[in-house]
Amino acid sequence: MSHPVVAIVGRPNVGKSTLFNRLIQRRLAIEEPTAGVTRDRIYGRADWTGHEFWLIDTGGLTFEEDKISREIHRQVKLAMEEANVIIFVVDVRSGPVTLDYEVAAMLRKTTKPVILAANKAESPNFDMSEFYALGLGEPTLTSGAHGLGTGDLLDEVAKHLPETEEFPEDEEILRVAIIGRPNVGKSSLTNKLSGTERVIVSDMPGTTRDAIDLLIERDNRKYLFVDTAGIRRKSKVDEAVEYYSVLRSIRAAESADVVLMLIDAAEGVTEQDKRIAGIAHEAGRALVIVVNKWDKVEKDDKTMDAYRDNLRDELAYITYAPILFISALTGQRVQRVYELIDYVAEQHALRVKTSRLNELLEDATAVVPPPSKKGKQLKIYYLTQVRVKPPTFSIFVNDPELAHFSYIRFLENKLRETYGFEGTPIRIYVRKRSKKGDKL
């Protein structure tokens, strides 16, 4: 499934990053009032009324001629080219300023839908008439800091989102994306898995420019492997061709059923590896960590265990992902890749009956009672699974504000202990009970 893209643009200090974090319901962007903190594009996954899409936070536009401003402008243009919908953020307190008119003039040239978000609207008393002069229609009042109006803004976005594309239900093809930094052996692994030399292999980073699809049938099952371009740090991505290669790699990971995240055994986990693994995690894809070039590591009988422990520490947010040590060059353990792909795909699609989930919930709350705040205790009425790929659950409670993240993490751990869910992220949404008669 391919998901649409929504870009957030505007001048500095209008609260774009705060609004971005509020819309994706997690803090990925730095909320800093100093202009220029956000320089490149930050991607986050949003979900609203059945629409899943990528949201991009961009740097503040100034139209100045210094190097940083020019780079920010280039990054914003790339985000706009990628986007299906654009959110233009202005500051309702200050009213439109010269820079807002300059940004608006740029946006009026695009054929894409532009939604005007008048941010920082914590107080209801504002003169909105000046914002109509921007020529972009009626503004939507929002407050990223307080969450006000964000639902209305997302409703406006949803009106313009295209339908997502899905594979035909009768076509059972498992899509597998192979991602990682340049020169970690992605193409070599693709060739070894297919038994062909379909993909060019070179020790020069950047050899693979496009996401290459390779259909393989094995044991009466079809796999569509996608060998992607190496994902480098954005500061290293200078050429337009490479920018789109990286973009296609992100898209391949997003649309896959299973992601193989390759790490160079000799180099260990880098900061860029952590960012790349986060792409699969945020997209909710099944994930296998593949440590390649294991033949180049000097080892004894304790090396693999020590390496695995270090990986778990470095990639603490994806401890659910199985780890496999291979050598694509020699073929060592490569065929085990298929076993893990099948296994995590099955876990990714696992569905548990509501009755069993509530038995688990009853046992869990008996061992560790729900938390309380200021004398008011969280009451959990029931737990149900609402989606697979990834397994997604809704917990219905008396007051979602009382559901501390640590308790939700405790329940996630109980789900994993009982049902596995190895190799797949789990999403848990806390909802307020709508019917008084609903009980655990």
Image (cartoon, rainbow, N blue to C red):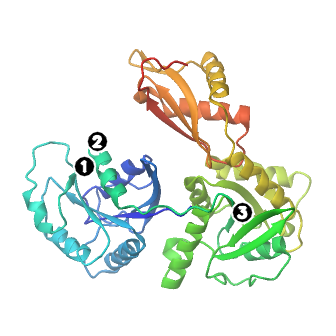
- The kind of residue tagged 1 is Thr
Disc 2 designates what residue?
Answer: 146
Residue 232 position (above or below residue 347): below
Q: Nearer the viewer, mark 1 or mark 2?
A: 1
- The kind of residue tagged 2 is His
Position of the C terminus by quadrant: top right
Tell me: 49 left or right of 99.
right
Please indicate, yes or no, whether residue 239 appears anywhere in the rendered image.
Answer: no
Q: Could you tell me which residue is drawn at 42 percent across and 50 percent down?
A: 24
Q: Looking at the picture, tell me which residue is in the foreground, 348 or 323.
A: 348
Residue 101 position (above or below residue 221): below
User: In x, y percent, where is residue 190?
Assistant: 77, 73
User: In x, y percent, where is residue 121?
Assistant: 19, 47
Contact (Cβ within 8 Å) of mark 1 with mark 2: no
Disc 3 designates what residue?
Answer: 173
Mark 1: secondary structure: loop
| Disc 2 packing (10 Å; few <14; some 14–19; many ≥20) | some
Disc 1 designates what residue?
Answer: 142
User: In x, y percent, where is residue 370?
Assistant: 53, 21
Q: Nearer the viewer, mark 3 or mark 2?
A: 3
Q: Looking at the picture, tell me which residue is in the foreground, 264 or 167.
A: 167
